[in-house]
């Protein structure tokens, strides 16, 4: 592996005692280190309020790696690269202390002044931290400095603009890496390849041949320990504004003229600009919101959202959203893109279904309704792969057709060990590849679209709860497609 692809770096994690660091970041850094993608010249500084020590942090790092990956080897050498500093984000001496520590570590580990500042903590401090990093000279080193930001990036367009302004006062756009972890998923990255490396799909990828597209990201978990965050967010801010609209952009974009970050982004931005903004009075024709009731999940009864915590008792927050998105351009005019996401649904799964138009004549079926459209299914998770639904002759006498499936399952190919999304994104950030991060223009356009929904919904009390835990959401989500004579495909 050459030097250029093996970054030397000091990674500073704000929020090192938190859940994200524990579940995703520590195991990802370890996997990068094990696979040789991270140079041995690296250090990680963990920051949080708690009065931990280097030793406590190292024990926690080892524990999180054990839980996530159960490695057989001793983790001492790896964890010795981790350092802890108790940190108050508003206190100036915390920043000068951090600067000294990083300078020291740069001497010890020879990291050439390369710095990643990873903000894995409450968003209200993002702006303050970025500015203090600048003020105390932490981003002026002999190497590169990058700022990684977790979502939520604001709660609406206005707050996102304000946050962006604060960040941009300290860091340039090229130094800001806004994480959307869906963009690190193997099969999401595969959307472009499936489309642009296969004539049989790309030639048909338009309103002449596709009748509709369905994107479903369903979860079985409820709100868990995140009631405080989630109740102010809801499924629209939590999933639609970012992950779902990013998938729409990748599915609908034009082929980029090259695979550079700028070219890909500019095509995605064009899609987001072409999404039809709804008039407020039309919101309920295009979107459905839901909140889960109690129910039965795999034989276990689970409580309603409103019974998950005291503060949720009268909540009007949506835990489910389904909607119809229209893209007003030459390629997509007239093709609905349906999205659906929610908590406490029947299964944990993310899938994209491309439904092709039926042939005009029915030669092989007894009735028109028996016709099966061709479908391309992109399985994002938990299985990774693609399935193509075709029609073939039913064996035996007669000339009737029946549906068959051609399936490719990525997980079943030996030797393929799909990296975690965070592992890929951290690596991309360290090598300066921002393709799979969201540009400010994408964030702004996505907020602009969902703000209309949120605004209308905030003014009306919904009739919640309206779907049972363990179902696939409210009936209205099925009716949304039935109005257009479609239905959700499930596999
Ligand atoms: C996060 C949301 O961005 O995505 C969570 O905040 C959600 O509420 C999660 O559970 C889903 O991610 P994944 O990778 O499990 O589909």
Image (cartoon, grey):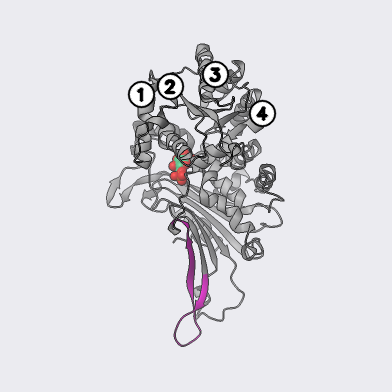
From the top left corner, tell me how far across and down residue 267 is, in percent.
68, 47
Counting other residues with Cα less than 10 Å from the Cα at mark 2, is it few (<14), some (14-19), or many (20 or more)? many
Q: Give the distance between the C-alpha atoms of the residues marked 2 and 1, in whole angstroms.
A: 8 Å
Q: Nearer the viewer, residue 103 or 358?
A: 103
Disc assigned to residue 172: 4
From the top left corner, tell me how far across and down residue 236 is, in percent.
51, 41
* Residue bearing the label numbered 2: 84
* Residue bearing the label numbered 1: 56
From the top left corner, tell me how far across and down residue 451 is, in percent.
58, 38
399 in the magenta segment: yes
Nearer the observer: mark 3 or 4; the answer is: 3
From the top left corner, tell me how far across and down residue 128 is, in percent.
56, 20
* Quadrant position of the N terminus in the picture: top right
Nearer the observer: mark 3 or 1; the answer is: 3
Q: Residue at x 47, y 36 (%)?
A: 29
162 in the magenta segment: no
């Amino acid at each position: 592996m050459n030097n250029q692809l093996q970054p030397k770096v000091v990674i500073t994690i704000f929020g090192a005692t938190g859940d994200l660091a524990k579940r995703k970041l520590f195991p990802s850094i370890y996997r990068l280190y094990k696979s040789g993608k991270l140079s041995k010249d690296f250090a990680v500084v963990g920051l949080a309020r708690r009065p931990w020590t280097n030793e406590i942090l190292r024990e926690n790092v080892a524990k999180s790696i054990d839980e996530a990956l159960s490695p057989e080897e001793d983790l001492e050498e790896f964890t010795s690269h981790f350092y802890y500093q108790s940190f108050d984000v508003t206190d100036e001496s915390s920043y000068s202390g951090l600067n000294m520590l990083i300078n020291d570590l740069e001497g010890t580990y020879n990291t050439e002044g390369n710095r990643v500042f990873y903000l894995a903590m409450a968003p209200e401090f993002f702006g303050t931290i970025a500015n203090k990093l600048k003020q105390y000279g932490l981003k002026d080193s002999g190497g590169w400095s990058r700022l990684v930001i977790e979502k939520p990036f604001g709660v609406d367009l206005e707050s996102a603009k304000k946050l962006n302004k604060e960040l941009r006062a300290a860091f340039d756009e090229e130094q800001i890496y806004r994480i959307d972890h869906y963009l690190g998923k193997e099969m999401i990255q595969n959307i472009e390849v499936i489309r642009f490396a296969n004539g049989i799909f790309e030639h048909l990828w338009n309103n002449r041949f596709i009748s509709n597209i369905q994107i479903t990201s369903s979860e079985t978990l409820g709100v868990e320990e995140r009631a405080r965050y989630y109740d102010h967010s809801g499924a629209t801010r939590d999933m639609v504004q970012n992950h779902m609209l990013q998938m729409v952009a990748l599915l609908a974009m034009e082929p980029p003229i090259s695979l550079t970050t700028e070219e890909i982004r500019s095509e995605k931005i064009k899609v987001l600009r072409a999404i039809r903004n709804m008039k407020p009075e039309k919101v309920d024709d295009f979107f459905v919101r839901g909140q889960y009731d109690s129910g039965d999940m795999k034989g276990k009864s689970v409580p309603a959202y409103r019974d998950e915590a005291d503060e949720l008792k009268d909540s009007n927050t949506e835990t489910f959203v389904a909607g119809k998105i229209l893209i007003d351009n030459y390629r997509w005019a007239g093709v609905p893109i349906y999205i659906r996401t929610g908590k406490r649904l029947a299964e944990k799964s993310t899938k994209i279904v491309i439904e092709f138009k039926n042939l005009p004549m029915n030669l092989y079926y007894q009735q028109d309704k028996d016709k099966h459209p061709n479908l391309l299914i992109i399985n994002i998770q938990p299985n990774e792969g693609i399935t193509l639904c075709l029609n073939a002759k039913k064996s035996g006498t007669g000339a009737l057709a029946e549906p068959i499936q051609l399936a490719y399952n990525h997980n079943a190919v030996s030797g393929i060990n799909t990296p975690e999304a965070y592992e890929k994104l951290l690596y991309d950030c360290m090598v300066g590849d921002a393709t799979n991060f969201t540009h400010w223009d994408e964030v702004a356009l996505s907020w602009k679209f969902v703000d209309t929904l949120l605004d209308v919904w905030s003014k009306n009390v919904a009739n919640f709860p309206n779907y049972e835990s363990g179902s696939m959401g409210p009936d209205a989500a099925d009716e949304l497609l039935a109005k257009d004579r479609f239905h959700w495909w499930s596999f």
